[in-house]
Image (cartoon, coloured by chain):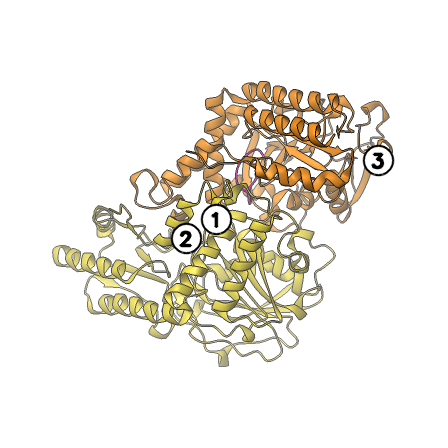
Chain colours: A yellow, B orange
Amino acid sequence: MTTRAYNFCAGPAALPEEVLKQAQAELLDWQGRGLSVMEMSHRSDEFVAIAETAEQDLRDLMQVPDNYKVLFVQGGASQQFAQIPLNFLPEDGVADYVDTGIWSKKAIDEARRFGNINVAASARAQDYFAIPGQNDWQLSKGAAYLHYCTNETIGGLQFDWVPQTGDVPLITDMSSDILSRPVDVSQFGMIYAGAQKNIGPSGLVVVIVREDLLGRARSSCPTMLDYKVAADNGSMFNTPACFSWYLSGLVFKWLKAQGGVEAMARVNHEKQRRLYEYIDSSELYNNPVSRSARSWMNVPFTLADAALDKVFLSGAEERRLLNLKGHRSVGGMRASIYNAVPLEAIDALIDYMKAFEKEHG
Amino acid sequence: MTTRAYNFCAGPAALPEEVLKQAQAELLDWQGRGLSVMEMSHRSDEFVAIAETAEQDLRDLMQVPDNYKVLFVQGGASQQFAQIPLNFLPEDGVADYVDTGIWSKKAIDEARRFGNINVAASARAQDYFAIPGQNDWQLSKGAAYLHYCTNETIGGLQFDWVPQTGDVPLITDMSSDILSRPVDVSQFGMIYAGAQKNIGPSGLVVVIVREDLLGRARSSCPTMLDYKVAADNGSMFNTPACFSWYLSGLVFKWLKAQGGVEAMARVNHEKQRRLYEYIDSSELYNNPVSRSARSWMNVPFTLADAALDKVFLSGAEERRLLNLKGHRSVGGMRASIYNAVPLEAIDALIDYMKAFEKEHG
């Protein structure tokens, strides 16, 4: 009998139950070697195989071209916000950033500490409920790169298109929608993602970076923040986050077993379709994001009467529907429905929302 | 029946079996909440309690004074090597460093990228087999701090005394001997330690820093590398390495149950005493480190005939004595005997070494 709840947490987020079960089974004794993955030298044959298999499975899942390096590093996306200008923005250069919400804004604020940043577009005029079309963007001449966030975890705003910037490398924060649907990696200079939403446990960041962009770090860039150092050392310049790497590898295997990213995209499409459709049909619930920019991964919604929020949340917890409280900066509710959240969880959530509306609507 | 081997890995290193068993038992369902620790928001009441309890237990174990902050951060000691000058070395200042081996040398090399570094003392003249006494150190006037490494994991060289530097803050890399014996924290400006030896899984660094040293970071210091930002945000400026933090907390509880650091020191004293005594009595094995500087945690030793190394290692593996191969820069063998390696493991190792000597000596 499972005691597992449905977990709608924005991150660290739900992991596939099969993955946790395998990790549990081999936690004290990995494949008969007499020790845990957590107790292995990162330079042992065993762990190197775990690490390389994880990388290859991710490459397979995302069809990463051979001229891209895949890195497994630490510090979260927030550390990337500094690493990106330190690696790619010359001191006298300019970089373009698109502001679509809290996370892209954080990237902008940190980058400004290291150079000249042009906000090429902002969703502020639309209250962050829609993404400005590229025709309205003010791109810089000779920008070192353009940075944007594919999916704003807090606002629930997601690009369903890829900006076109010619020779200017696209750098994108895919923390909350990587592996949720197919992406053409070759359109990007660099993709990065904190693991704790669609990949694995927190404390790990996946970076997919085009090789020709490496080797440009400023002399003031700490060694550990230089992507080339990580790339040249197979992400083992020092001890990596071994257990998170291992567990992410189990998630990649699970994704392959589900049919890969295309299969996940079909399920994810259906999950968000059912949830938004119900929200739009209801009198009690509301999602303000324009339809074409609605996130498949994070669905914020408000109740017509905010006084009902607490009642809604405690009723949800009774039904084992966890972590539906919206981000403190937005209020209301948020259902994060990443890959590891099954369709049944969405149906259970909708059932509860319907029953709650009937009683309180 | 346990299938666990004796694990002498230098890091990631052995963890207490009781800790792994508890983590295993609650891996899918932490205390009946229906989700794994890996799936909890770091801002949830549950995880905040886990994090705060871990911090308090570490404070208890090390008797950390109230005017010190305890941080749980990422990036390994290698990232600290940059953070230290970025936080504490003014651009026109000088910092003193002591070179006792590979890890303190790495700290020196990275710090030199950010300012004026004086190597106040080096063990090079003694082939890194002894630590120069403080009378022979060349300290700078007005140094911003003095950095040293209490225990060189690779060379097996450990300070059994604390340098006296008056008002100059002592900063020390305690990655491989933290919690192995009592330390008077008040003698230090900052102590840091990668978790993967004596604390928990890799991907976590514990920093214990005196509050008055915070707030001096350079303007060019990435936000994530500023200790004050970590301190002001309870190490949750962004998502921390939650699972490693949790597991480290279980290790702290285990240490308390063993009787704390004093009790560990008694066991560790006996472990190293038995091993060095046997090595010194043997004709086949040799440890070149001067007795007062021998590490309690990492015992490198060579065989009189290096051609026997492979035979020794494969025989050890047959007896489930794992990871005894010396670091590639040193060769020979190394037994890392951290807190989680029990006295029985040392006895089993000595038994094997004796049998091997009888056959091959």
What range of the chain is rendered magenta? B198-205
The answer to whether dots 1 and 3 both sit on one chain is: yes
Quadrant assignment for the C terminus of chain A = bottom left
| Residue toward you, A123 or B26 | B26
| Label 1: how many Cα within 10 Å (few below 14, some 14–19, many 20+) | many
Residue furthest front in the image? B359
Check disc 2 and report its element: helix, strand or loop: loop
The answer to whether dots 3 and 2 both sit on one chain is: no
Amino acid at the residue labelled 3: Arg
Placement of A22 over or under A132, stated as above or below? above
For marks 1 and 3, give the one nearer the viewer: 3
- Find residue A242 and report its horizontal and vertical position in percent: 54, 48
**Magenta-drawn stretch, dominant element (helix, strand or loop):** loop
| Label 3: how many Cα within 10 Å (few below 14, some 14–19, many 20+) | some
Q: Chain of mark 3?
A: B
What residue is shown with label 3?
B124
Placement of B303 over or under B184, stated as above or below? below
**Left or right relative to B44: residue B280:** right
What residue is shown with label 1?
B239
Residue contact between numbered discs 2 and 1, judged by CB atoms under 8 Å = yes
Q: Calculate the distance from the C-alpha at mark 1 to the C-alpha at mark 3.
A: 41 Å
Amino acid at the residue labelled 2: Gly
- Find residue B25 and report its horizontal and vertical position in percent: 36, 38
Could you tell me which residue is drawn at 44 percent across and 31 percent down? B18
What is the quadrant of residue B157 in the picture?
Answer: top right
Could you tell me which residue is drawn at 66 percent across and 59 percent down? A86
Amino acid at the residue labelled 1: Thr
Residue B76: in sight, yes or no?
yes
Check disc 3 and report its element: helix, strand or loop: helix
What residue is shown with label 2?
A11
Residue furthest left in the image? A359
- Find residue A196 and report its horizontal and vertical position in percent: 45, 53
